[in-house]
Amino acid sequence: MGRPLLAALVAAAALAGAHGTARADLLDDVMKAKKIRVATDLAIPPSGMIDGNLKPIGSDVETAQLLAKDLGLELDFVQTTGATRIPNVQTNKADLIVSTLSVTPERAKVIDFTKPYAALQSVVGCLTSMQAKDWPDLKGKTIAVSRGTTQDTTLTNMRDRDLRIARYDDDATMVTAAVSGQADCVATSATIVSQIGAKNPARAFEPKVPITTFDLAMGVRKGEPRFVERLNAWISDNLRNGKLNAIYKKYHGSELPPEMRGS
C-alpha cells in the first residue's frame, strides 16, 4: 500500500473517530437545558402518587426532587406505567427513570442502571383470611399483577406452578381489582399489599409468599457513562448523609437495608 493512500486512510479513520466522540452527551444536554425529565409512575403509592392538591408526592417523587435541586435543574415529571418506563428513555421522552425500577439482567441488556438508591420487597399478598404460606398453596389461585413488572415476569416464568395470572395496566388498577373483590391475591411490593386494607378494611391483605428483594436503581438509556457516573456519585453522597434513607422511611415505614445505607 502506497504511503499517500495509507496516510489518507489513517486520516479518514481519525476523522471518523472524532465524529464518534462528538456524539451528544446526555449529561451535557441536561445541564445545558437546565431541566431534567424524569419518568415516574404517579399511580403507585407510596412511591409515586398525587395528593389532594394534585401535586406529585411519594418516595420516588421526593428522590427526583432532591436530585434536581442538588443539580440545580428544573424537574419535569413524565408520567409513566410499569410497561412504559424503559421505552420512555429509549425514545428520548425522558432522561431518567426514577420509578421503583428493580435491577434485572434482562433490563440491563436494554438500559443502563445506576447503583441502587432504594430496595423493594416483592411478595404475593392475599386476603388475610386466606391460608397460604408457600407456592403450592397458590395453585389455581388468580393473582393480579401489573403488566411489565418484575413480578409479572417472575410469575410468567413459573409455568410449573399452575398459577392464574390477571394482568393490569398499572398498580392503581391492580389495587382497585383487589379492593373491589376482583382478585384475592396480588403480586407486588409488600408496601402496596399493606395499603389495600386501608382502602377497604373489609378486604385487608397481608404478605403471604415472598418472591424476592430487589435493588431499586435509576435507569438511563444505553451509552451515557458520564451521566451514570454523576448519578452514582449523587446516590452515594445521599446514602451516606442519610437523606435517601429518611425519604424511604417517611413513606415506607422502614429503613433501607444496612448494607445500602453504609455505601
Image (cartoon, rainbow, N blue to C red):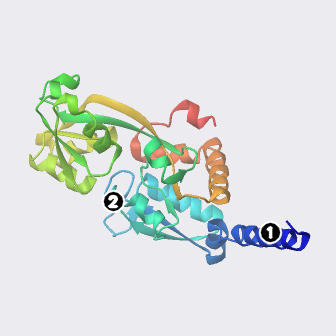
Q: The N terminus appears in which quarter of the rendering?
A: bottom right
Front-lying residue, 248 or 27: 27
Residue 141, image x, y percentages: 12, 34
Q: Decide if residue 83 is in sight here.
A: yes
Question: In which quadrant of the rendered view does residue 50 lie?
Answer: bottom left
Q: How far across and how far down the image is residue 17, in percent?
A: 74, 67
- Residue 67, horizontal then vertical, whole percent: 58, 59
- Badge 1 element: helix
Q: Nearer the viewer, mark 2 or mark 1?
A: 1
Residue at left offset 53%, top offset 66%: 95
Residue assigned mark 1: 14
Element type at marker 2? loop
Q: Is residue 110 left or right of residue 159?
A: right
Between the residue at mark 2 and the residue at mark 1, the CA separation in whole angstroms equals 43 Å
Q: Quadrant of residue 115?
A: top right
In the image: residue 61, left or right of residue 210: right
Reading the image, the residue beneath label 2 is 81
Of the 4 image quadrants, the one containing the C terminus is top right
